[in-house]
Image: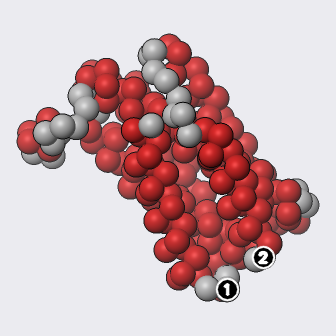
Amino acid sequence: MDDARKMGLPGEPAGERLIDRVLRVDHAGEYGAVRIYEGQLAVLGRNGTAGQTIAHMAEQERRHLEAFEKMLPARRARPTLLQPVWHAAGFALGAATAMLGEKAAMACTVAVEEVIDAHYREQIAALPDDEAELKSTLEEFRREEVEHRDTAIAHEPHAAPGYELLTSAIKAGSRLAIWLSSRI
């Protein structure tokens, strides 16, 4: 990475403002992920292959969320003010995709995790070298998110009704949620 990229663009946060933004948006993202899986499990249940798979992924997301819930006060960062929105929107997205079937639920995971993989990569690259512990945590979580994507792909999500439209809409919504949560 060149030095100009590492320094960031004019107007982009640095130092503690960057850490505050990273923790806020990642906490919001993990919270939203937990809610998506809760919505899917409410419709699909925990039995069967898809239900068990989703329950496993949800447990990993809960662990990520718990880590950010500890980091926020430790780093004197604040959560997003949009958490009530993500509470409802995450559950609704999860339930709606599950109502379309197991393959659509897995398509949701593929779409979200593709966006999150890129998001975590960008954050890791933007963090200064003295944030090695945070970078390591983000890299661990990123690998688990990629694992979720790969697991979902194994469930043939491309067979979901309207796969391209569905995943495009979910990716756009995920990118918007990241942008909003990092700022509000």
Whether residue 53 is visible, yes or no, is no
Residue 130's x, y, as percent?
27, 21
**Which quadrant would residue 2 be assigned to in this image?**
top left
Q: Residue at x 66, y 54 (%)?
A: 89
In the depicted structure, whether residue 9 falls above or below residue 107: above
Crowd tier of the residue under label 1, counting other residues whose Cα lies within 10 Å: few below 14, some 14–19, many 20 or above: some
Residue 140's x, y, as percent?
49, 40
Q: Amino acid at mark 2?
A: Gly
Total count of labels? 2
Q: Residue at x 54, y 52 (%)?
A: 145
Q: Is residue 91 left or right of residue 138?
A: right
Camera-side residue: 177 or 116?
177
> Is the C-beta separation of discs 2 and 1 under 8 Å?
yes
Query: Which residue does the numbered mark 1 point to in the structure image?
Result: 161
Q: Residue at x 89, y 59 (%)?
A: 45
Q: Earlier in the sequence, mark 2 or mark 1?
A: 2
Q: How is the image coloured?
A: secondary structure
Give how far apart the Cα atoms at labels 2 and 1 are.
9 Å
Q: Is residue 64 left or right of residue 123?
A: right
